[in-house]
Image (spheres, helix red, strand yellow):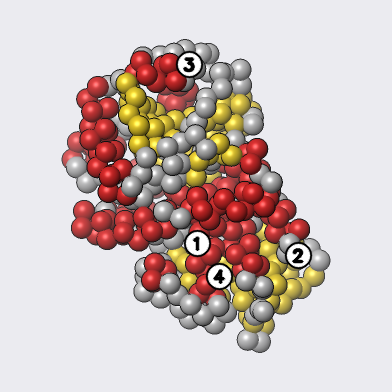
Amino acid sequence: MAEILVLGAGMVGIGAALALQARGHAVTVVDRRGPGEETSFGNAGVLQAEAMEPYAMPRDLPTLLRYALGRSNDVAWSLRDLPSIAPALLAYFRASAPERHARISRTYAQLIARVVSDHSPLIEAAGANNLIRRTGLGEIYRTTRAFDAACARGEKKATCYGLRLRALAGTGLASEEPAIAGETAGALIWEDSWSSSDPGGLVMSYAQLFRRRGGRLLQGDAQTLERAGTGWRIDTGTGLVDAQHAVIALGPWSGSLLLRFGYRIQMLLMRGYHSHVSNTPELSRPYLDAENGYVMSSMRDGLRLTTGVEFVRPDRPQSRRQLDWALHSAAELLAADMRAEGKLWHGHRPFLPDMLPLVGPAPRHEGLWFDFGHGYQGFTLGPTTGELLAEQLDGDTPPVAQALLPAARL
Ligand SMILES: Cc1cc2nc3c(=O)[nH]c(=O)nc-3n(C[C@H](O)[C@H](O)[C@H](O)COP(=O)(O)OP(=O)(O)OC[C@H]3O[C@@H](n4cnc5c(N)ncnc54)[C@H](O)[C@@H]3O)c2cc1C
């Protein structure tokens, strides 16, 4: 049994803490906020069992031109911030070359294939079934051309990975999901994916499970982490805590902490927004409005619209452009008056240009471990990479974990 500090109480940190605890280690999680209050709070809440291939950067000229000219709601960017992110974007572009992407997908598919079975026992033990829908993820297409192309791509992917997929024509969608009153060409339903009506609440319920099983959750600043003899020490609200191992699971903030230890992590912080609208009809599952670049999902606080990616420096002020586009598009689909309520939330997907999270021992510091960089799918993958990290810490590196190791990639 080892004493282990996990820094960060998002889905990734709590997932790792539970996996380490299950192997008999004494685990303390430290966060400056409560569990699941940052990126793991603000996402679209989809447990993406269909995401067998990580999102590659499009390389075809028409799509790149649409992005460049601001004619897509998937991606927004700012000219003044482009130089600072250009090297990471270029690395992402290179990793997205078809052959390399296929190789990365072989690893990714092995991770995604087990996410439902990794979340299931936690959902049961945490008593969180009321936060979970097992109704799939929908992709809505407005034009027949886009729908036909998506059906062809979808069928290929479903066959390749053994996923359950249903294609619904526009009329079929309208009768299955009466809230969608606007005209559509059709939808694809990925039946294996699950979703949460309260993503932050799900992380909180996992954190409560961790605590019930004897884990410690403390408030403190991860920036106080330092070497102490052969182990690690952190200053928390209840004093100094020492441990043999420290796991960095700070999501988008992992890179800034690791700079202090001499690691320069090339990470794209892909901003996304969400807002809620109340008094809209309930949807049975989340839907991606594919040609308009946002996801809508019924949540505890109303219908949540989450946007695509904005490439700006993390300290830049918010822009409403993508969310307003999403509101306008959702109003058409639901034939409803869509006015955003409350504060506009934004957070950053912590994305590594080679599309895989970094999971494993820090290359130059004994007892320091990485578990971050989950990009678009950290809510989905937290328990899975937590389990892989726990296996490594106990001296076993399963084959799928080899591709995630920091030593080979930094
Ligand atoms: C708009 C949007 C939609 C998304 N939709 C989905 C989706 O549908 N499905 C999916 O799987 N993923 C989705 N994602 C991605 C997913 O949300 C992230 O990959 C995931 O939440 C990352 O989890 P994390 O635990 O690494 O980070 P976080 O949840 O951000 O946790 C990091 C923790 O570190 C703490 N911290 C930071 N600095 C310090 C410090 N100095 N001291 C102490 N604590 C600190 C923070 O308080 C925080 O609790 C989406 C992301 C966005 C932005």
Whole-number angstrom distance, CA of label 4 to CA of label 1: 8 Å
Mark 1 is on which residue type? Thr
Badge 2 marks a residue whose secondary structure is: loop
- Counting residues from the start of the chain, the first of labels 4 and 3 encountered is 3
Tell which of 389 and 258 is nearer to you.
Answer: 389
Mark 2 surroundings: few (<14), some (14-19) or many (≥20) residues within 10 A? few
For the C terminus, which image quadrant?
bottom left
Q: Residue 214 carries which label?
A: 2
Whole-number angstrom distance, CA of label 1 to CA of label 3: 38 Å
For the N terminus, which image quadrant?
bottom right
Asked if one can make out residue 78 in the rendered structure from this viewpoint, the answer is: no
Left or right side of 136 for 156: left
Q: Name the residue under label 1.
A: 385
Badge 4 marks a residue whose secondary structure is: helix
Q: Are marks 1 and 3 in contact (CB under 8 Å)?
A: no
Residue 60: x, y in percent? Answer: 19, 42
Q: Mark 3 points at which residue?
A: 178
Q: Are marks 2 and 3 in contact (CB under 8 Å)?
A: no
Mark 2 is on which residue type? Gly
Q: Are marks 4 and 2 in contact (CB under 8 Å)?
A: no
- Counting residues from the start of the chain, the first of labels 1 and 3 encountered is 3
Identify the residue at horizontal 48%, vertical 71% (top origin): 360
Whole-number angstrom distance, CA of label 4 to CA of label 2: 17 Å
Left or right side of 78 for 119: right
Q: Mark 4 points at which residue?
A: 390
Mark 4 is on which residue type? Ala
Identify the residue at horizontal 46%, vertical 36% (top origin): 136
Whole-number angstrom distance, CA of label 4 to CA of label 3: 45 Å
Whole-number angstrom distance, CA of label 1 to CA of label 2: 21 Å
Identify the residue at horizontal 45%, vertical 45% (top origin): 48
Mark 4 surroundings: few (<14), some (14-19) or many (≥20) residues within 10 A? many
